[in-house]
Image (cartoon, rainbow, N blue to C red):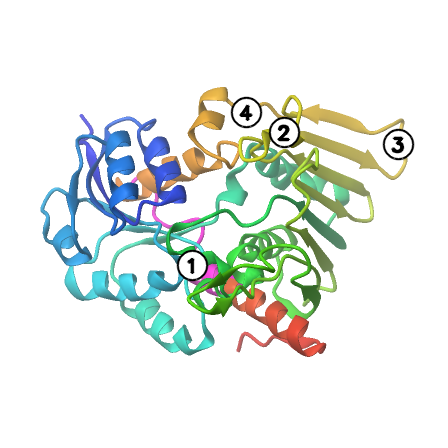
Amino acid sequence: MKKTIRYGMIGCGMMGHEHLRNIALLDKTEVSVIFEPDAAMAQSALALAPQARLVSDLGQLLDRPDVDCLVITSPNHCHLGQLQEIAGARPLPVLVEKPLFTALDDLKALESFEQSYPAPVWVAMEYRYMPPITAFTDAVERVTGGIRMLTIREHRFPFLKKVGDWNRFNAKTGGTFVEKCCHFFDLMRLLIGSEPTRIMASAAQDVNHLDEVYDGEQSDILDNGYVIVDFANGARAMLELSMFAEGAEFQEEISAVGALGKLEAKVPGPGRFWPEHLGAAPIPLLIESPRNPQGPVVTEIPVDPALLEAGDHNGATFYQHRLFLALVRGERQHADVTLADGKKAVLMGMAAQESAATGRAVALNWG
């Protein structure tokens, strides 16, 4: 008989609630302890995990014996400090939300943690595990013969309201290309199978949050932009982001082109935030277009309705948690998304932020 795996939750805002709902769908699991400083969010989290105990700080959580693994879903700028506190007190397997860190000054501390932490760490990159993206990943080499051009387009709603409004500022998020887009840069590396060498970006804050001021500080978060990435193997990728396009039929559209053909994935977003803009939710699609076609092959990628109810990532959070649980149980030896993967995704986002600010291309050298 497998023992019940008990989770400690560090931060339980909007994304933390999604993790709670998906952990509840896994066999032989329970959330035993929750640390969430905001009282309203803590009580809301407790309604989803009534067996859990609330604690007032991370130290109290780590002192609890009934914790087998940890999930970090706190604001971005808290992640690294919390990982360091865990390392100094009680190293346990960790699933930590992206991004891993928010400032270049954090890099040495992260690398020190990476070299010394004795337990597995999985960086949460939900987009890898969306069923249409998984199908895309499985088919892309066969359809394209090897990616030469990769385009990721996200047309979505603005940043949502978060506790303390932390997501309105570059200093706490790392910037939009870090906070919102590091998972797209992670996908680029995964799909192309090579490392980026140069990044160019053009971006601005043109529509969203322009009149928002918090404690005398104006919101400075980008809301649209383009990023072009050159890779060492000669492939190139582009990201197109608009965060004032909540009426789009599909939130993400990904296309890969190679010598043999083109593959596309079309992924709907969570319509619950702006239902007035959307009709019936579209079904995710995978479209294969060979160079000598009899016509494109369009495949619908169904997603379990129960998983759609549990979160806003087309079931990805559940599939990611199922794999992380196997890692905690010792049924898998390594995390799919390592600290190195998470670090590189953030550094790509920071390079895009720098390029957009300076108007210059940024060279990347991984040493």
Q: CA distance from mark 3 to mark 4?
A: 28 Å
**Along the viewing direction, whichever of 348 and 274 lies nearer the viewer:** 274
In the picture, the disc for residue 293 is: 3
Above or below, comparing residue 40 to residue 101 in the picture? above
Q: Under tag 2, what secondary structure?
A: helix
In the picture, the disc for residue 303 is: 4
Instruction: Give neighbour class at mark 3: few <14, some 14-19, many 20+ (Cα, 10 Å).
Output: few
Residue 36 rendering spot, x and y as whole percentages: 25, 48
Q: Under tag 1, what secondary structure?
A: helix
Q: Amino acid at mark 1?
A: Trp
Q: Residue at x 72, y 76 (%)?
A: 359
Q: Residue at x 36, y 70 (%)?
A: 110
Q: Which residue is mark 1?
A: 166
Q: Is residue 211 left or right of residue 327?
A: right
Q: Amino acid at mark 4?
A: Val
Q: Amino acid at mark 2?
A: Glu
